[in-house]
């Protein structure tokens, strides 16, 4: 009998004893490897999209080939005013990236209420692969982006929910499981721009997009191959309604309060990511102006700083996993909120660190060393390793039974609003001193840490896992 057909209680019992993958259930390995390929396709697409639009497709001689582009351009410019080629490309790119973090809400709802996680994830993977391959046709840009957004919505929250479903509510391995899951993402962030970006820029745009599509098909194959190790599907339809009527399955007052609290802390989580997300927005612009990018006579492209960040992020995620495993063997492991607050305080040190070279520049100093970029990435990623993946673990654990996919979709909302906020903050570079700009970011991230500590002090018992009942 496979995990796909095991009763829920039996599956939970097996998961407690399954340590086949780095001390975790075997299903975590399959889900992480699948997520690696899905993120490879996503970040490969992301690395190329704005360059493809601004350098080729949205040029005056080509933009007329894009079906429906006149209507979209009119809609954008009715809000922003006339846009140049580059500005229009950035606007379309921003809309695409923003909606990536909105559609998982609907994908989670569809899986929870109607299709189940497996079917929804498979449909999402097929839609994304279709979107990547449609990018080979200039006229099909907008249908391609629509397929990608719908596919990410169906895929993203539901595969993360399946990671959480591998663990019983009180299993302390859940937080480290999501760190391993995010480690797969970091590997994809390193590989995707190198493979898809090189093919797209050096061979042809469509080769880059095609390689992203192939990556997504590999991810789908991995997912289907590992299906027997994944969590069983939750009941839906009439059986779900019957189960919901059972006293132990009702959400109750505690569940409603937990749900309200998880939604209420989204603004705090939004602040927690501003230092990390600014590394991809304001920091490259600031670096172009003030950083000496010449190393041994070679002019280092600013975009390479993103690869450096990904490499450091991978290392710090591994270090965080090792540290908490070491800690758990000697002391009681802290809960998710405590870990996230600690991560915020560490991550706040990254923009605070940049105040030192910023003050030097304002005092009339020369361009700063590229090593400051390494320092920013190192400190930020040590903290961030304990924010985003640990938040995923918290939301997957506390989410009401039958609503895990929807709840993780709601969790991603803080990234949507956070990225909008970071874009506005980046505009302050033109009107603020660099030292004040980075001080503001350090204060915002530290404020998120304080906010999480308040949540811990006031609502810690509400978010704590209930003691598991002894087996009969």
Image: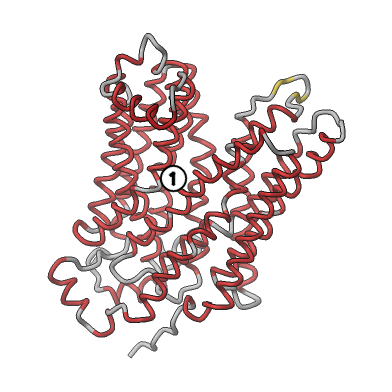
- Tag 1's secondary structure? helix
Locate the C terminus and report the quarter of the image it occupies. bottom left
Residue at position x 72%, y 53% in the image: 349
Locate the N terminus and report the quarter of the image it occupies. bottom left
Where is residue 259? Give x, y as percent: 39, 70
Horizontally, is 222 left or right of 320 in the view? left
Q: Nearer the viewer, residue 232 or 387?
A: 387
Q: Nearer the viewer, residue 3 or 72?
A: 72
Which residue of the protein is positioned furthest toward the top in this rendering?
Answer: 61
Q: Nearer the viewer, residue 121 or 258?
A: 258
Q: Nearer the viewer, residue 193 or 144?
A: 144
Where is residue 369? Give x, y as percent: 79, 33
Residue at position x 44%, y 26% in the image: 81
Horizontally, is 34 left or right of 367 in the view? left
Q: How many other residues sit within 10 Å of disc 1, few (<14), some (14-19) or many (≥20)?
A: many
Residue at position x 26%, y 30% in the image: 143
Horizontally, is 128 left or right of 332 in the view? left
Which residue of the protein is positioned furthest toward the bottom in this rendering?
Answer: 472
In the picture, residue 61 is in which quadrant?
top left
Where is residue 267? Give x, y as percent: 51, 58
Vertical placement of residue 458 versus 139, above or below: below
Indicate the colouring scheme: secondary structure
Vertical placement of residue 69 versus 2, above or below: above
Residue at position x 39%, y 32% in the image: 212
Where is residue 213? Give x, y as percent: 34, 32
* Residue for badge 1: 36
The mark total stands at 1
In the picture, residue 446 is in which quadrant?
bottom right
């Amino acid at each position: 009998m496979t995990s796909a057909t095991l009763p829920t209680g039996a599956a939970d019992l097996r998961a407690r004893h399954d340590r086949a993958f780095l001390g975790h259930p075997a299903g975590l390995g399959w889900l992480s490897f699948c997520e690696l390929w899905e993120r490879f396709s996503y970040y490969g697409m992301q690395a190329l999209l704005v360059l493809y639009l601004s350098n080729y497709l949205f040029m005056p001689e080509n933009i007329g080939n894009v079906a429906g582009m006149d209507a979209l351009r009119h809609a954008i410019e009715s809000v922003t005013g006339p846009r140049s080629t580059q500005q229009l490309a950035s606007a379309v790119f921003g809309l695409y990236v923003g909606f990536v973090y909105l559609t998982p809400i609907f994908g989670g709802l569809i899986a929870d209420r109607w299709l189940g996680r497996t079917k929804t994830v498979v449909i999402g993977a097929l839609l994304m692969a279709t979107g990547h391959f449609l990018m080979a046709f200039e006229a099909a840009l907008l249908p391609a982006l629509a397929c990608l957004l719908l596919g990410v919505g169906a895929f993203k929250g539901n595969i993360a929910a399946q990671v959480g479903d591998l663990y019983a509510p009180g299993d302390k391995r859940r937080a480290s499981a999501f760190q391993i899951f995010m480690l797969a993402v970091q590997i994809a962030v390193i590989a995707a721009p190198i493979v898809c970006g090189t093919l797209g820029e050096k061979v042809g745009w469509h080769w880059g997009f095609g390689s992203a599509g192939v990556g997504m098909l590999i991810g789908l194959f991995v997912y289907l191959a590992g299906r027997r190790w994944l969590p069983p599907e939750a009941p839906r339809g009439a059986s779900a309604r019957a189960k919901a009527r059972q006293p132990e399955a009702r959400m109750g007052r505690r569940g409603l309060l937990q749900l309200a609290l998880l939604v209420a802390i989204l603004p705090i989580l939004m602040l927690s990511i501003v230092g990390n997300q600014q590394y991809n927005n304001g920091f490259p612009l600031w670096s172009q102006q003030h950083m000496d990018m010449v190393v041994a006579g070679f002019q280092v492209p600013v975009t390479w700083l993103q690869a450096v960040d990904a490499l450091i992020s991978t290392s710090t995620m591994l270090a965080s996993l090792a540290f908490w495993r070491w800690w758990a063997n000697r002391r009681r492991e802290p809960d998710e909120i405590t870990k996230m607050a600690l991560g915020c305080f560490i991550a706040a040190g990254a923009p605070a660190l940049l105040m030192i070279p910023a003050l030097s520049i304002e005092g009339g100093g020369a361009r700063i060393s590229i090593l400051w970029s390494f320092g920013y990435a190192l400190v930020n990623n040590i903290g961030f390793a304990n924010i985003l993946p640990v938040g995923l673990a918290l939301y997957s654990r506390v989410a009401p039974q039958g609503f895990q996919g929807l709840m993780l979709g709601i969790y991603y909302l803080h990234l949507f609003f956070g990225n909008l906020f970071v874009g506005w903050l980046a505009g302050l570079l033109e009107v603020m001193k660099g030292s004040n700009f980075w001080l503001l970011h350090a204060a915002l991230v530290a404020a998120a840490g304080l906010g999480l500590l308040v949540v811990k002090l006031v609502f810690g018992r509400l978010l704590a896992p209930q003691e598991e009942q002894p087996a009969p």
